[in-house]
Image: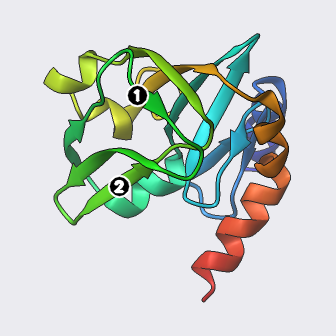
């Protein structure tokens, strides 16, 4: 058993993943996180946005994702879509401002990708950033992990 835990710890370290005490939620180290449970992956002047593993777990099975139009703009803190699950419908809040340059059309036919792969295949939009300084107001992986633990304990 101890060797299995050690292996898992090494694998998580290699993959640069930190895990919650609860085994089902993961937080990737290279992303930024909003307190509304969206993540951002920055690549130059563009950013990929999705909902976190923590958020998808609380929502349950996602059955529909409302996607915005390519070319529309989003503002940090503003709603740009919704995720509907068997439990509830939740707004998706943009953690950054900019122009939407791509939406994940796969989610129209396979909304469950948000559950199965929230950080890879379940991304929602790609945005050309207006102001990279907005990223400074988002949490890193350690702060987001603590934020979720505190939220779950209340």
Can you give x and y, in whole percent of width and height, for residue 145 in the image? 74, 59
Residue displayed at 76% across by 49% down: 138
Residue 91 falls left or right of residue 84: right
Name of the residue lying farthest toward the bottom: 154
Vertical arrangement, residue 54 with respect to residue 113, above or below: below
Dot 1 or dot 2: first in sequence order is 2
Can you give x and y, in whole percent of width and height, for residue 7 in the image? 78, 34
Can you give x and y, in whole percent of width and height, for residue 86 in the image? 16, 59
Of helix, strand and loop, which one carries label 1?
loop
Can you give x and y, in whole percent of width and height, for residue 118 in the image? 46, 35
* Mark carried by residue 122: 1
Of helix, strand and loop, which one carries label 2?
strand
Vertical arrangement, residue 46 with respect to residue 6, above or below: above
Dividing the picture into quadrants, the one containing residue 12 is: top right
Instruction: Give the Cα distance between marks 1 and 2.
Output: 16 Å
Q: Residues within 10 Å of mark 2 (few under 14, many from 20)?
A: some
Residue displayed at 70% across by 78% down: 150
Residue 26 falls left or right of residue 16: left
Residue 118 falls left or right of residue 2: left
- Looking at the rendered image, the disc whose residue lies closer to the viewer, 1 or 2, is 2
The front one of 16 and 142 is 142
* Mark carried by residue 14: none
**Numbered label tally:** 2
Q: Residues within 10 Å of mark 1 (few under 14, many from 20)?
A: many
**Residue tagged 2:** 91
Dividing the picture into quadrants, the one containing residue 134 is: top right
Residue displayed at 56% across by 52% down: 77
| Dots 1, 2 in contact, CB < 8 A | no
Q: Is residue 24 visible?
A: no
Q: Is residue 74 visible?
A: yes
């Amino acid at each position: 058993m101890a060797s299995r835990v050690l292996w898992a710890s090494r694998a998580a370290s290699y993959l640069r993943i930190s895990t919650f005490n609860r085994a089902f939620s993961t937080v990737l180290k290279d992303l930024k996180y909003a307190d509304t449970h969206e993540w951002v992956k920055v690549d130059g002047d563009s950013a990929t946005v999705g909902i976190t593993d923590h958020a998808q777990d609380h929502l349950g099975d996602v059955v529909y994702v409302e996607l915005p139009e390519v070319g529309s703009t989003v503002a940090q803190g503003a709603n740009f879509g919704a995720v509907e699950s068997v439990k509830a419908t939740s707004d998706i809040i943009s953690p950054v401002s900019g122009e939407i340059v791509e939406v994940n059309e796969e989610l129209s036919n396979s909304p469950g990708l948000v559950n199965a792969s929230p950080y890879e295949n379940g991304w929602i939009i790609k945005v050309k950033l207006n102001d990279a300084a907005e990223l400074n107001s988002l949490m890193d992986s350690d702060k987001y992990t603590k934020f979720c633990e505190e939220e779950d304990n209340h």
